[in-house]
Image (cartoon, helix red, strand yellow):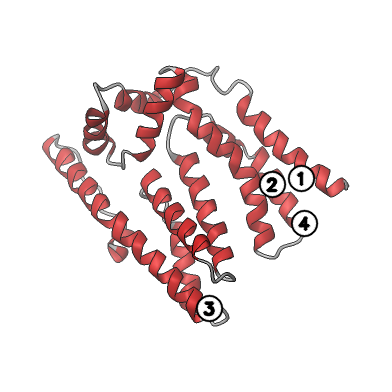
Amino acid sequence: MSMKLSVCASFVCGFLFRFINFDKAPLWIDEYGTWWVIAGMDLADLVERTLNIQGQSPFYYSLTYFSALIFGAAPYGLRFFSMIAGILIVPLGYFLVRRLGQSETTAMSTAWLLAANNYLIFQSQNARPYSLALFFGLLASYAFVRSLTSNKIFPHFVCMVANVATFYSHYLICGFWLAQISYLLISKTISKRAKVMSFLCAGAVCFYVCPPYRICQLLRAERKSSNGWTILHQSPVFCGIF
């Protein structure tokens, strides 16, 4: 009973640490970038600004656009999805550790570490896509682990959608997907059906992610070149994948 109470307490603290005063701090320079993207005339303008200036997918900014329509283009509206994702990260991390076969104590410790982590709290109160990307990455990992022992389509489908959402939230967060692929390549214990279905999901991720990533990178390179900026070399990880 005390263990369950501690787990519940970590969930509650994770919520309180992120919710209390999350809209009190003024926007800082990176958040003003998000505000500028969604301040266009319409969604078409948002997409154009995202691709040409941010060099990212419009996915996160579209969500923020609608939350700003509901709550206003103030810190509350701009940070809404970051806060929700940050709150859900705590229980999701707990259940992922349990799904990996670890003890209740290890899972509880993970929940507390996620709940009280200053950096995660900051990102939950930040109008940027990192908290949302981490949430989808953990969700994809949970669905992936569950799919390894299931012959049903649903866990594989959730894994695929969550992986795509992770990339669309932020292109550079590819560690979760790489870990899944690496496990599939080296594991000799999972069934052939589960391995084939997982690889198909991974292939779908490549299909959906590769084209928009390349387009965004080309637009970013063109913008930097036209402005006389130094063009950074592409990450060797992505060069190897895409």
Question: Which mark, residue 187?
Answer: 3
Callout 3, which amino acid?
Answer: Ser
**Mark nearer the N terminus (2 vs 3):** 2
| 123 relative position to 73: left or right | right
Question: Residue reaching furthest right?
Answer: 1
| 108 relative position to 212: left or right | right
**Mark nearer the N terminus (4 vs 2):** 4
Question: Which mark, residue 63?
Answer: none
Q: Are marks 4 and 1 in contact (CB under 8 Å)?
A: yes
How far apart marks 4 and 3 lie (CA) works out to 25 Å
Write the residue at 27% across / 57% down.
210
Q: Secondary structure at mark 2?
A: helix
Callout 4, which amino acid?
Answer: Glu
Q: Are marks 2 and 1 in contact (CB under 8 Å)?
A: yes
Image quadrant where residue 16 sits: top right
Write the residue at 50% across / 71% down.
183
Q: Secondary structure at mark 1?
A: helix
Circle 1 Cα neighbour tier, 10 Å, few/some/many (<14 / 14–19 / ≥20): many
